[in-house]
Image (tube, rainbow, N blue to C red):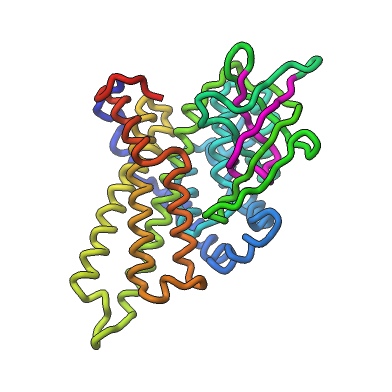
Amino acid sequence: MHPRHPDIDPQLLSETEEQRELRTVLRDFFTEESGPEDVRKHLATPRGHDETLWTRLAGEIGVHGLAIPEEFGGSGFTFAELAVALEESGRALYCAPLLPTVVLAAHALLNSGDQQACERYLPRIADGTLTATVAGFDEAEPGVGAERSGPGWVLRGAVDFVLDGAGADLIVVRARTTEGARLFACEPAEDTCPRTPRRVLDETRRQALVEFRGAPATPVGESGEVTAALDAGRAALAAEQVGGSGHALDATVEFVAQRRQFGRPIGSFQAVKHRLADVLVALEAARSASAYATACVALASPQLPVAASAAAAVCSETYRLATAEYVQLHGGIGFTWEHPAHLYVRRARSGEVLFGTADQHRTRLAELVGLTTRPAA
């Protein structure tokens, strides 16, 4: 059973001066280079995002390598700095595969303890020349099997709705073997690893069916344990959701201050004030939950499972509320296809189920703190 009281120094939940400077740089960068019209434009491209911007984000600002150790080509900072970047990317609805590449795949490699795999892939993730994703991580029994073929291994099976599955250069796969689940690195080829894009609600976060038909793969580490990588993904998604919620609230406040009815701004009406106050209160709670989960990832705290599930439940519900009010309080214009609100609504709704629903996370929390007798996942 996990202890019920946090073991994180409260000072670690506040931003440092360096993190504030990073936030300012990133907000200016995304405002200038990745506005709503830019997002719409790049959704229609084969890769789904601006590849030049992806390279600049890695090279000019160094976002991709923030949480990667210097020995593997990164900057040697922590997940706390990466969370700042993720929050700002969520605020701008940046549509490149940061979450699967820089968080899920990178942390899976780091947590594996496989020096050779880290040396091979992490420098390319850090410099933006390699995109990556994971498959089979959220399945109790992997849908992919691994078998020996001569001196190496091949994968057989399929995983659906893989983040950036159709475009990623590397897939870290959790597959079953005769000795139990294990991680494998697969660089997909068309003949042995066909990938079919799926039509999804949130087009800014592409997903695909990935099939393995004797795809060559290399073992990564000795274990199939991926809970820590998944929890890092939950903390990262929470940071994104805080950023998106912040945008929704700020844009709505700006609109109601300008839109006039009955001779005064609609933001002066008490009913509107109450609704915006509810969003603000929820957003502050989400910031706290996200900050705690971020600190737990950065410190590899044993409290991470609790913090990650708490953040997942709180931040997903806050994002849903914030985007609902984003649409409603913009009135008729909020319902139009041309307005960016619907893009945020889609991101919010898809994120609610990405790593489990809020109810599933509450159930996990109950198990982790000993309120139920079933073992926690």
Kindly report the secondary structure that dominates the magenta region of the rendered protein.
strand
Which residue is the extreme one toward the top?
179
User: In the rendered image, which quarter contains the N terminus?
Assistant: top left
Residue 229 appears in view: yes
Q: Is residue 223 left or right of residue 320?
A: right
Q: Relative to the observer, which residue lies in front, 98 or 272?
A: 272
Note whether 65 is above or below 346 in the view shown.
Answer: above
Q: Is residue 375 left or right of residue 138?
A: left
Which residue is the extreme one toward the bottom?
263
Q: Is residue 302 left or right of residue 346?
A: left
Q: Is residue 187 magenta?
A: no
Q: Residue 310 occupies which quadrant of the picture? A: top left
- Residue 140 locus on image (x, y percent): 50, 25
- Residue 299 locus on image (x, y percent): 41, 30
Note whether 369 is above or below 12 in the view shown.
Answer: above
Q: Is residue 193 left or right of residue 281?
A: right
Q: Relative to the observer, which residue lies in front, 282 or 288?
A: 282
- Residue 240 locus on image (x, y percent): 45, 49
The residue lying at 77 percent from left, 18 percent from top is 152
Q: Relative to the observer, which residue lies in front, 195 or 219?
A: 195
Q: Which residues are magenta?
A: 153-176
